[in-house]
């Protein structure tokens, strides 16, 4: 398969993740969208690297950084929720 | 159409579909199940590109660490967000347009860019191959896929049990 096909999938994933981060008001949804964007970046890095091993190393670094970022984001979401602000990221109280 | 192309089409469709499912759900559990599918599909795409270590790392880090951790956290009352909160239609529309525009621009840029037609076959880097053989062995992908399937099954069964309990 040509690298452009993988890059196209990565671009679509990034666009979907970006949409999720902006459109949804929940912290969990924002984290999921961020993970989608990070996943797209990993795929693009490996696809553009071709035979070079640097792409794979960058991908592994991204995976670890993404896991750490997700843990930090969850910790922030829990702390904010415990303070009574709710898991929403748009300042709403969460009531329908 | 070769088998590789069919496999790529299936995996790409699975990834994009699960991503769309994941970002359109307001229920955190559904979003996480969708994210799990996306991660699994991306790991398979990485394996197709020859990045075996990255694929295994993705499956192990997320399947064994992060996704079950989030799934456990979403069972906590403070993060349960199944209240069907009203969305923000204007912002959602703007975000969708922004996402489509970004994807279109990226797609055009990719199509117009000068890329090698086919990535050359990866010559096994000695250091990485030795590390992969030492750490995970030859059946690493099968093992990683099995782990991912078990974790996904656990998450789905837990969600089903929880739904049944809530209905009661």
Image (cartoon, coloured by chain):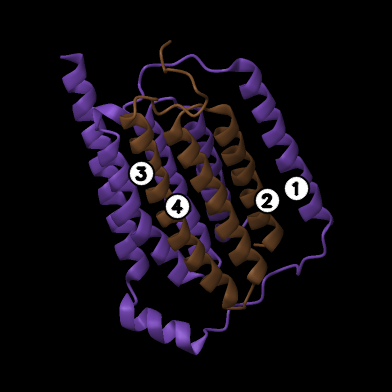
Chain colours: A brown, B purple
Distance from Cα at disc 2 to Cα at disc 4:
25 Å
Question: Given this view, does label 4 or label 1 mark the residue nearer the observer?
Answer: 4
Between the C-alphas of marks 2 and 3, the distance is 33 Å
- Residue beneath disc 2: A8
In the image, B148 versus A2, the foreground residue is B148
Residue at (20% x, 15% y) in the render: B167
* Alpha carbon distance from label 4 to label 3: 10 Å
Please give the chain letter of the residue carrying mark 2. Answer: A
Mark 4 element type = helix
Drawn side of residue B138 relative to residue B162, left or right = right
Question: Which mark is drawn over residue B107?
Answer: 1
User: Quarter of the image holding residue B28?
Assistant: top left
The percent position of residue B59, horizontal first and vertical second, equals 38, 58
Q: Are marks 4 and 1 on the same chain?
A: no
Numbered label attached to residue B56 = none
In the figure, residue A15 lies in which quadrant? top right
Give above or below for B95 relative to B123.
above
- Dot 3 alpha-carbon crowd within 10 angstroms: few under 14, some 14 to 19, many 20 or more: few
- Contact between marks 4 and 1 (CB within 8 A): the answer is no
Give the residue furthest to the top: A96
Mark 2 is surrounded, within 10 Å at the Cα level, by few (under 14), some (14 to 19) or many (20 or more) other residues, namely many
* Pointer 3 chain: A
What element does badge 1 sit on?
helix
Tag 1 near tag 2, CB within 8 Å: yes
Closer to the camera in the image, B91 or B11: B91
Q: In this figure, which residue is indicated by the disc labeled 4? A: A69
Mark 4 / mark 3, whichever is N-terminal = 4
User: From mark 4 to mark 1, how far is it between C-alphas?
Assistant: 28 Å
Q: Quadrant of residue B92?
A: top right
Residue B101: image x %, image y %?
A: 75, 36
């Amino acid at each position: 398969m040509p690298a452009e096909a993988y890059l196209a999938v990565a671009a679509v994933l990034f666009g979907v993740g970006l949409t999720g981060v902006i459109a949804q008001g929940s912290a969990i949804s924002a984290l999921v969208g961020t993970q989608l964007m990070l996943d797209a970046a990993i795929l693009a890095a490996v696809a553009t690297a071709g035979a070079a091993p640097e792409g794979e190393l960058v991908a592994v670094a991204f995976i670890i950084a993404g896991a750490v970022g997700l843990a930090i984001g969850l910790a922030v979401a829990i702390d904010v929720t415990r303070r009574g602000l709710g898991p929403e990221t748009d300042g709403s109280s969460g009531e329908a | 159409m070769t088998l590789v192309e069919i496999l790529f089409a299936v995996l790409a469709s699975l990834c994009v579909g699960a991503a769309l499912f994941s970002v359109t759900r307001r229920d955190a559990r559904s979003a996480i199940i969708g994210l799990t599918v996306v991660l699994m599909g991306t790991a398979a795409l990485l394996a197709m590109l020859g990045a075996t270590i990255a694929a295994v790392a993705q499956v192990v880090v997320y399947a064994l660490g992060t996704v079950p951790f989030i799934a456990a956290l979403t069972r906590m009352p403070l993060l349960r967000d199944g209240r069907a909160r009203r969305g923000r239609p204007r912002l959602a529309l703007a975000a969708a347009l922004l996402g489509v525009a970004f994807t279109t621009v990226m797609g055009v840029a990719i199509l117009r860019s000068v890329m090698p037609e086919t990535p050359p076959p990866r010559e096994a880097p000695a250091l990485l191959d030795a590390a992969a053989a030492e750490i995970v062995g030859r059946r690493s992908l099968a093992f990683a896929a099995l782990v991912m399937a078990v974790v996904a099954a656990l998450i789905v069964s837990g969600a089903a049990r929880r739904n049944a309990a809530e209905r009661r």
